[in-house]
Image (cartoon, rainbow, N blue to C red):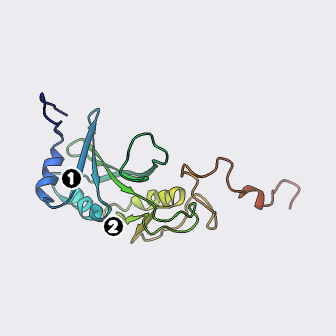
Amino acid sequence: MSQSQGKAPTLDHPIFAVLKERFPDTTLRGTEFRGQATLILNPADLHEVMAFLRSDERCAFNFLSDVTAVDYNDYPAETLGRFAVVYNLCSYSRDDRLLVKVYLDPSISTEGIEPDPALEVDSVTDLWPGAEWTEREVFDMFGIRFRNHPDLRRILLWRDYPGHPLRKDYPLRGRGEREAYRVVDRTSS
């Protein structure tokens, strides 16, 4: 990031200029911290921009390293939403990395038990097939759904698990899930 006297900071990452040229009517936000660039998108624009980042030769982000999420509940600074879905993209030809974030705000308060229609973004499994398992993990742990995912079901917890344990409002000791299941030991056969 460079900064002149009295002027707002400008972002140096070359991908930001390419995206601004290709998507002039789309709200694109960008940040850089310690040399790491982050692109912030509106959920509705996610799939189109991600497809461009993958297919355009100036970007060539041919590898999706990770999909994860962050819960900003009770975060001390202001954020654009309670949850952020974070995509870690790599371009091997340019030896470059880009983080892409999409912020979501829950519309209903169900403590993570019922699906919230506001916690949904487009799946990128059609662009990067390796996103299938990481999107399932985000769904399982945070309750964020991925539209058009080929097999969106829990991956770490059982199907009827009553919540999403990586949400910050989830109780540390759980909601009684462990107490409801019979303990199986060596003598129970």
Q: Is residue 35 left or right of residue 65?
A: left
Residue nearest the observer in this picture, 85 or 137: 85
Marks 1/2: CA–CA distance: 16 Å
Specify the label residue 60 is tagged with.
1
Q: Nearer the viewer, residue 81 or 95?
A: 81
Count of number-bearing discs: 2
Hey, which residue is sitting farthest top in the picture?
Answer: 5
Residue at image location 24% in from the left, 49% down from the top? 29
Q: Is residue 50 left or right of residue 87?
A: left
Q: Of the numbered discs in the image, which one, if any, rests on residue 126? A: 2
- The location of residue 40, given as percent across then percent down, is 29, 51
In the picture, which quadrant includes the N terminus? Answer: top left
How would you rate the neighbour count of disc 1 (Cα within 10 Å): few for under 14, some for 14-19, many for 20 or more? some
Toward the viewer: 26 or 130?
Answer: 26
Q: Is residue 103 left or right of residue 159?
A: left
Q: Nearer the viewer, residue 98 or 70?
A: 70
For image coordinates 42% across by 58% down, the residue present is 105
Q: Give the answer, above or below, for where 3 lies relative to 184.
A: above
The picture places residue 20, in percent across and down from the top left corner, at 14, 53
Picture quadrant of residue 146? bottom left
Q: Residue at x 16, y 54 (%)?
A: 19
Q: Identity of the amino acid at label 1?
A: Ala
* The quadrant where residue 163 appears: bottom right
